[in-house]
Amino acid sequence: MKAVQFEGTVPRYVYSTIAGAMSRAAYYDKFSNIVLRDVSPPELPTPEWVRVKTKYAGFCGSDKNLILLHDSPSTSPFASFPFTIGHENCGYIVEMGKIAAQRLAARTALAEAACAASAKADVGAGAPIGLGARVLVDPLLSCVPRGIKTVCPSCARGDYSLCTNFTEGSVSPGMSIGTCRDTGGGWSQEFVAHYSQLIPLPDNVSFEDAVLVDAFCSSLHPVMRNFPRDDSTVLIIGCGVIGLSAIASIRALAGKARIVALAKHKFQGEAAARLGADAVVYMSRSSDYYAELADALGAKLLKPMLGKRVVVGGAHTVFDCVGNSTSIDDALRFTLPHGTMVLVGLAAFPKGVDWTPIWLKEVQVRGSFWCSTEHFENRTLRTYEVAVELVRTGRLSLSSLLTHKFRLDDYKQAIQANLNLRESQLIKSVFEFN
């Protein structure tokens, strides 16, 4: 079968780093680390695993960072090369290991019993998981998927994205499906997953909604861990799919905080308004977005001797959904005293960030990595499960964010569209399989 893989070799890395300064095509041409090739389908690592036929696989912002070599080399020990890209995956179960089949049958029986015993007519837990089942796959390769019996402290408390065993166990190093050479990834026709990673899709949750869940959860997790008060103001920096998902998360959870969004492109700002942003400011070379943002937040700007203007006032909570030097610097400046700045974007080596607001305004800076386990309506659920429940119950629709679909053979066009958002007006793209 065909797969788009990341080679992970130093010579290819050096080539793209040098040639990429002249043309971004060097990051995904035939000499780069991005390769379309024929590969054998991955084997089931243990009888606890299943094989999934891919229906949709998302193109994540982290995949763009991977292609452009923006990731810190410090993350390389948590991957095994070459790996098939693709961690935002949904599809059909086409093969089941013996233990996986037994565990999933038992899980289905328990879910059906819980539905029958519940006072509610429908608690959304009774969808069966067997051959042919439609599933969403939580890609994290934490302790349980790796067959580690005594789970680490992070996994024990449900913080699977902070697992300390991403390099141990029954499969090669990798934080997730899509970074591990043994599991394959969604940028291919098939991949394998541990039974614990499977989330059944209710009939009224489409594949188009399901494939957006991972991106949504990258925002849902930090929003739920830093949920804004109804009488507060929130600033969302960046209106790509992560920033838009942050807005959607707050509104889907019935949050009434005032939301101000900072967008780069008009189509992004229009989407932010549709999802519930109260005000949209555009970051463009032709406008003074600092003045416009200060006005939207009721803040005041002061001119220092040198450098950027100083912001007096701002937002109670700022979600930086970009993660570059400019966005981090702006996020800190526009956070109120004793406010919270949440770093959602994947920062690596930010330069030129003025850390003064952290101590001058006693700003709390919090990081957020991927998704985890949340407390939701008196239940403890994985973030993926919360998202599916929000879609199932009609409080959330994600499919409108899916703007582009590509075939795997057209992966270079997909990369180009993701690198040129103004021209493509892309919010979220996926690879589609039969």
Image: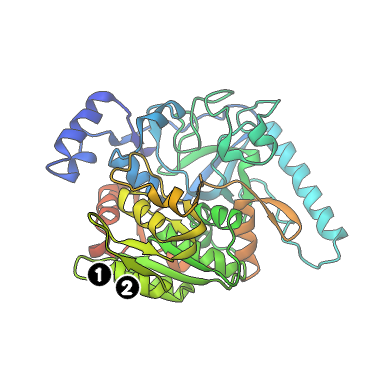
Residue placed most toward the observer, 147 or 353 = 353
Question: Are the residues tagged 2 and 1 within 8 Å (C-beta)?
Answer: yes
User: Label 2 belongs to which residue?
Assistant: 292
Residue 125 drawn at (x, y percent): 73, 56
The residue furthest front is 305
- From this view, report whether residue 262 is shown above or below residue 138: below
Q: Is residue 429 visible?
A: no
Q: Quadrant of the N terminus?
A: top left
Residue type, numbered disc 1:
Asp
Residue placed most toward the observer, 39 or 170 = 170
Could you say which quadrant of the image residue 156 lies in?
Answer: top right
- Please tell me the numbered disc located at residue 288: 1
Could you say which quadrant of the image residue 198 lies in?
Answer: top right
Residue 257 drawn at (x, y percent): 55, 71
- From this view, report whether residue 414 is shown above or below residue 51: below
Residue placed most toward the observer, 425 or 137 = 425
Residue 74 drawn at (x, y percent): 39, 29
Q: Is 304 left, or right, of 248 in this rendering?
A: left
Mark 2: secondary structure: helix
- Please tell me the numbered disc located at residue 159: none
Pointer 1 local density, CA inside 10 Å: few below 14, some 14–19, many at least 20: few
Could you say which quadrant of the image residue 76 lies in?
Answer: top left
- From this view, report whether residue 403 is shown above or below residue 373: below
Query: Mark 2 and mark 1: span between their CA atoms?
Result: 6 Å
Residue plotted at (42% across, 55% down): 320
Residue type, numbered disc 2:
Glu
